[in-house]
Image (cartoon, rainbow, N blue to C red):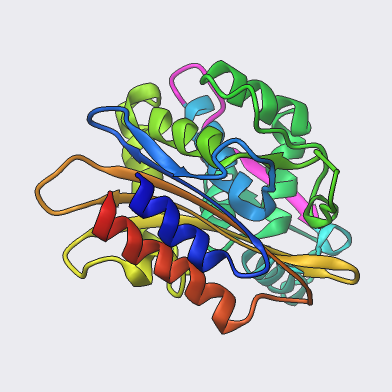
Amino acid sequence: MEELESELARLEGGGRLGVAVLDTRAGALIGRRLDERFALCSTFKLVLAAMVLERAAPGGRALDERVSFGAEELVSHGPVTKAAVEAAAARGASRAELSLGELAHAAQTSSDGVAANLLLRELGGPAALNAFCRAHGDSFTRLDRFEPEMNDVRPGDERDTTAPRAMAQLVGALLGGALAPEARNTLRQWMIETRTGAARVRRGLPNDWLAGDKTGTGGGDGVTVKCNDVVWIEPSGRAPLVVAAYYDTGTVAEWPSDADQAVLAEVGRCVAKFA
């Protein structure tokens, strides 16, 4: 553990890097800044997708249930939902429709913020997501706002935050058996399909390790850049690992640089070496 923490400290630079590495077989957890608060950014969408899948169990809301929305609900990042609105407009319709399952898939795989907002609206808002976390043993993670406001997290603000330990343990619980098998398999597959983290933790892992993730990214006027990644890893010949990496770069900018993302790729290399 000391070797891993030392390497993570070296990567931190002038920012703040929190990493939790959970061994799902033994339950052992190691890392750095394990219980410090970091901005969730879009990593909450992994939890939201899990919540949708859990509620789609027999007797719950079906994944094919349709949700209506229009151009007025679009926010800055909504590749799937924007395309749906444009397609509806081309047909002469003022509103588009996607299913709960399609929205959850979009929120997870392409980090569609509109899809996340629509799902939160349908399922009871941030309070419902927080209740889902509590029901699965996470008393720390909190979502307070919708996209895009929830990405504006400044020093001392606890809104829309988590900690590496809390997120790693939550994801480990969800994919380790808390979700029903069908929901668990679907969430795992969606994480593997996700490509927003190709330059982050997954880049530093050995080629024969299967992995899926959910990124979170923040920045903007007066806001330090956040570069996050939550990863489910299936190493060759051993039990899965969960890595929750949260990097507040300390630099005010609109978006992470290649160097910022490379820090998380180095986290992947450290995990492969020391975990």
Left or right side of 17 for 56? left
Quarter that holds the N terminus = top left
Q: Percent from the top left, x then y, of residue 273?
A: 25, 60
Q: Percent from the top left, x then y, of residue 27?
A: 31, 28
What predominant SS class does the magenta segment belong to? Answer: loop
Q: Which region is colored magenta?
A: 57-69
Q: Residue at x 16, y 65 (%)?
A: 208
Judge whether residue 254 can be spotted in this image: yes
Q: Percent from the top left, x then y, of residue 103?
A: 59, 50
In the image, 87 versus 221, the foreground residue is 221
113 magenta-colored: no
Q: Quadrant of residue 265?
A: bottom left
Left or right side of 122 for 71? right
Q: Quadrant of residue 216?
A: bottom right
Judge whether residue 190 can be spotted in this image: no
Q: Percent from the top left, x then y, of residue 4?
A: 37, 53
